[in-house]
């Protein structure tokens, strides 16, 4: 019996080597430049989106991206699917694989996406888990490249805040592009050892660098990019008060931003908790690129879809 070729997945930035990441960035830029012209590169193809958590950008960008490429999107809410509750993850993966061409999953537990990918015969895209957000990381590095130039070897990206899913993907993308990454989290909120070690290894391989610490000013000093994300992610709401106290002093505000280069850009994946991790003044200020960053989700999703569904490389 012939064995079917394994589908390519996009579960982590770690799934990409330097060439793969460079390809996706070039493809995203080309698709962005070609707009509003639409080539039906995915005509007749269907993408399912199975989400256990809310979303604006991820869901909308895949939906619009698929439509612009001539394909079709189906959204399945938590109430409908009940991954692992109404039906086993493996059975959902098998059924979905019989009907659609690719699937985006947004799950509470990263293991759910990994399990789904083991049983799926179609490409599986991580649309956010508790551990990583690779689609966001790709849009982030595209935005940094647009603003700071394609060669990032002299660029320093400072991340101030929670050692969470967004940071995990951002830091892998930054070091893979040979840039310098500086991370400042409160003690006890560092990224997991697995992701720290992965980022350190990728940095060594790509001649990038990464340092972890607890001092926001040291991280931001002379940085080209200042990035933050929410202190309380989706699913951590019961920890809200404890986190608010722990993250005092980690707010990206005008005083902190003064330590970065005068032309530093400010990034946030959104949604923002204004007045917590970032002030209105900074988020709405002249250095903020957050809406360019949000728009880039559309262009990078299209590149991911073409890569997975057309075998582009
Ligand atoms: N940044 C991001 O992923 O936004 P959504 O949660 O709205 O998809
Ligand atoms: N860290 C945030 C990112 C939202 C896009 C969360 O997981 O809720």
Image: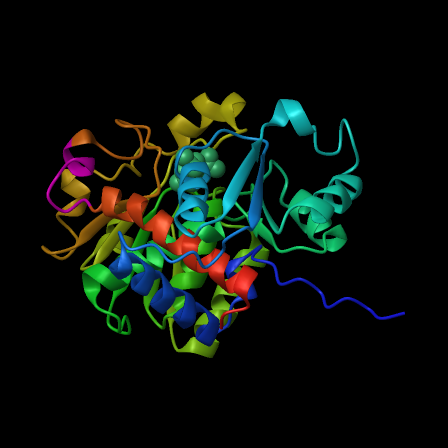
Residue 163 in sight from this viewpoint: no
Quadrant of residue 60 within the rendered picture = top left
**x and y, in percent, of residue 267 in the image:** 27, 47
**x and y, in percent, of residue 258 in the image:** 12, 48
**x and y, in percent, of residue 213 in the image:** 38, 54
| Quadrant of the rendered image holding ligand 1 | top left
Taking the spot 58% from the left edge, 54% from the top edge, the residue there is 11
Q: Quadrant of the N terminus?
A: bottom right
> Does residue 255 appear to the left or right of 103 in the view shown?
left
Q: Residue furthest right?
A: 1
Using the image as rendered, state which of residue 233 and residue 25 is in the foreground. Answer: 25
Taking the spot 54% from the left edge, 30% from the top edge, the residue there is 53
Using the image as rendered, state which of residue 114 and residue 233 is in the foreground. Answer: 114
In magenta stretch: residue 112: no
Image position of 63 with respect to 200: above or below: above
Using the image as rendered, state which of residue 29 and residue 100 is in the foreground. Answer: 100
**x and y, in percent, of residue 285 in the image:** 12, 39
Quadrant of residue 269 within the rendered picture = top left
Taking the spot 20% from the left edge, 37% from the top edge, the residue there is 283
Taking the spot 36% from the left edge, 40% from the top edge, the residue there is 229
Image position of 275 with respect to 6: above or below: above
Residue 19 in sight from this viewpoint: yes
**The magenta segment:** 281-288
Image position of 48 with respect to 124: above or below: above
Image position of 10 with respect to 289: above or below: below
Using the image as rendered, state which of residue 204 and residue 176 is in the foreground. Answer: 176
Kindly report the secondary structure that dominates the magenta region of the rendered protein: loop
């Amino acid at each position: 019996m012939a064995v079917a070729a394994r589908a390519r997945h996009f579960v982590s930035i770690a799934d990409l080597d330097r060439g793969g990441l460079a390809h996706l960035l070039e493809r995203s830029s080309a698709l962005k430049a070609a707009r509003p012209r639409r080539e039906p590169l995915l005509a007749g193809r269907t993408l399912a989106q199975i989400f256990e958590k809310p979303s604006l950008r991820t869901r909308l960008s895949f939906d619009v991206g698929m439509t612009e490429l001539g394909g079709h999107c189906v959204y399945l809410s938590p109430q409908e699917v009940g991954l692992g509750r109404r039906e086993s993850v493996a059975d959902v993966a098998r059924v979905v694989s019989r009907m659609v061409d690719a699937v985006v999953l947004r799950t509470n537990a990263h293991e759910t996406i990994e399990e789904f990918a083991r049983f799926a015969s179609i490409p599986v895209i991580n649309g956010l888990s508790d551990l990583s957000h690779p689609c966001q990381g790709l849009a982030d590095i595209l935005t940094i490249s647009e603003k700071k130039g394609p060669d990032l070897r002299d660029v320093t990206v400072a991340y101030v805040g929670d050692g969470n899913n967004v940071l995990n993907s951002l830091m892998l993308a930054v070091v893979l592009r040979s840039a310098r990454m500086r991370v400042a989290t409160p003690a006890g909120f560092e990224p997991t050892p697995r992701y720290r070690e992965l980022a350190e290894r990728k940095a060594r391989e790509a001649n990038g660098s990464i340092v972890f610490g607890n001092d926001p000013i040291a991280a931001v000093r002379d940085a080209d990019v200042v990035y933050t994300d929410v202190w309380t992610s989706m699913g951590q709401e019961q920890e809200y008060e404890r986190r608010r106290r722990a993250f005092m002093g980690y707010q990206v505000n005008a005083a902190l931003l003064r330590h970065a280069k005068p032309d530093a850009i400010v990034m946030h994946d959104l949604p923002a908790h204004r007045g917590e991790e970032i002030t209105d003044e900074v988020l709405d200020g002249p250095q903020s690129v957050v809406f360019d960053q949000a728009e880039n989700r559309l262009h990078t999703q299209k590149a991911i879809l073409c890569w997975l569904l057309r075998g582009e490389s």
